[in-house]
Structures are given as structure tokens and as C-alpha cells.
Image (spheres, rainbow, N blue to C red):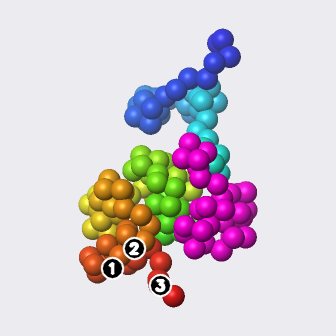
């Protein structure tokens, strides 16, 4: 091999797993794959692309400063709601939000779940974190946070 990592889709990898008689074939394919960024790297990447620093995310989201820095350093994994708050504050797209959720092992937004459908609607329509929170309340769904 020429040292370059391969890009396999999940479907391609699943197909390889189904066809393989020995896991070593799968293990080799996994070892040769380009690795996904970890959660912290991906969050930093989106923030950088949007020219939003940690201080601004903290201001917009109302997340306690030290807690957010623990999230950024990988010392803490945010809850799903916390991650959705961050996502809305940085203006992440639906794909970016779902990737953040997957990388944090929190499960992607699922359109067949009413609350998730409402959040998807808000993302697609450019709602802010506060607007998303109010919209969820109007739907009688659990908000991202409780007003103090």
C-alpha cells in the first residue's frame, strides 16, 4: 500500500463484514481507514470555520465557563441537550450537528421522533438556541434548557 488511508463508507464496511469469513480482513480494513476526527477536534473545526471562539459560545449558550472548557478538552462529554445547545449557538448544519452527536456517542437526530423533528426543523430554518428552545416548548416537547 502507498501509505494513504482509504475512505470506506459505513455501507461498504458493513458489506465487508458480512462477506468476511475471518475478522482479520475487517480488522485490516479498519486499520487502513482514514480515522474520523474525535468530538473535540470536530467541534473546534466547526467553531473555527464559523469564526466563533469559546468565549462567544459560552456567552450565547449560557453554559458555565469551566464546564465548556472541560467539554473542549475532552474531560467531559456533554449531555445530548447540552450538545444541541452548543450546535445551535455555533450555527452547525444538520449534518454537522448529527456528526457531533455521533462522535459524542449521543445518537443522531431522528426525524421520526417528534422532538427531534422539531429540532431538525429549527436547524433547517436557522433558529437560534433560544428560538429552538421556545419552539420546543410550543410543541409541548422537552426544551433544551429551563429558563431561570
Q: Is 72 one of the magenta-colored residues?
A: yes
Q: How many marks?
A: 3
Residue 107: percent from left, percent from top: 46, 58
Residue 141 appears in which quarter of the rendering? bottom left
The answer to whether one can see residue 110 in this image is: no
Name the residue that disc number 2 marks: 133
What span is colored magenta in the figure?
A: 46-75
Residue at left 46%, top 51%?
Answer: 92
Question: Viewer-proximal residue, 67 or 10?
Answer: 67
For mark 2, does the 10 Å Cα neighbourhood hold few (<14), some (14 to 19), or many (20 or more) residues? many
**C-alpha span from label 1 to label 2:** 6 Å
Q: Residue furthest bottom?
A: 148
Residue at left 42%, top 71%?
Answer: 130
Q: Marks 2 and 1: in contact by CB < 8 Å?
A: yes
Does label 1 or label 3 sit earlier along the sequence? 1
**C-alpha span from label 1 to label 3:** 11 Å
Determine the secondary structure under disc 2: helix
The answer to whether one can see residue 114 in this image is: yes
- Main secondary structure type of the part rendered in magenta: helix
**C-alpha span from label 3 to label 2:** 9 Å
For mark 3, does the 10 Å Cα neighbourhood hold few (<14), some (14 to 19), or many (20 or more) residues? few
Q: Marks 2 and 3: in contact by CB < 8 Å?
A: no
For mark 1, does the 10 Å Cα neighbourhood hold few (<14), some (14 to 19), or many (20 or more) residues? some
Name the residue that disc number 1 marks: 137
In the rendered view, tell whether residue 100 sits above or below residue 146. Answer: above
Question: Viewer-proximal residue, 86 or 35?
Answer: 86
- The image quadrant where one finds the N terminus is top right
Residue at left 30%, top 65%?
Answer: 118
Residue 21: percent from left, percent from top: 50, 29
Question: Viewer-proximal residue, 1 or 71?
Answer: 71
In the rendered view, tell whether residue 94 sits above or below residue 49. Answer: below
Amino acid at each position: 500500500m502507498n501509505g494513504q488511508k482509504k475512505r470506506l463508507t459505513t455501507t461498504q464496511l458493513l458489506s465487508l463484514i458480512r462477506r468476511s469469513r475471518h475478522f482479520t480482513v475487517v480488522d485490516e480494513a479498519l486499520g487502513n481507514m482514514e480515522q474520523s476526527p474525535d468530538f473535540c477536534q470536530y467541534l473546534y473545526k466547526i467553531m473555527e470555520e464559523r469564526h466563533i471562539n469559546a468565549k462567544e459560545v459560552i456567552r450565547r449558550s449560557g453554559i458555565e465557563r469551566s464546564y465548556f472548557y472541560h467539554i473542549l478538552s475532552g474531560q467531559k462529554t456533554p449531555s445530548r441537550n447540552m450538545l444541541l445547545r452548543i450546535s445551535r449557538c455555533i450555527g452547525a448544519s444538520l449534518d454537522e450537528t448529527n456528526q457531533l452527536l455521533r462522535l459524542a456517542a449521543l445518537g443522531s437526530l431522528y426525524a421520526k421522533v417528534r422532538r427531534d423533528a422539531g429540532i431538525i426543523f429549527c436547524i433547517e430554518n436557522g433558529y437560534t438556541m433560544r428560538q429552538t428552545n421556545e419552539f420546543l416548548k410550543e410543541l409541548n416537547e422537552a426544551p433544551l434548557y429551563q429558563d431561570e
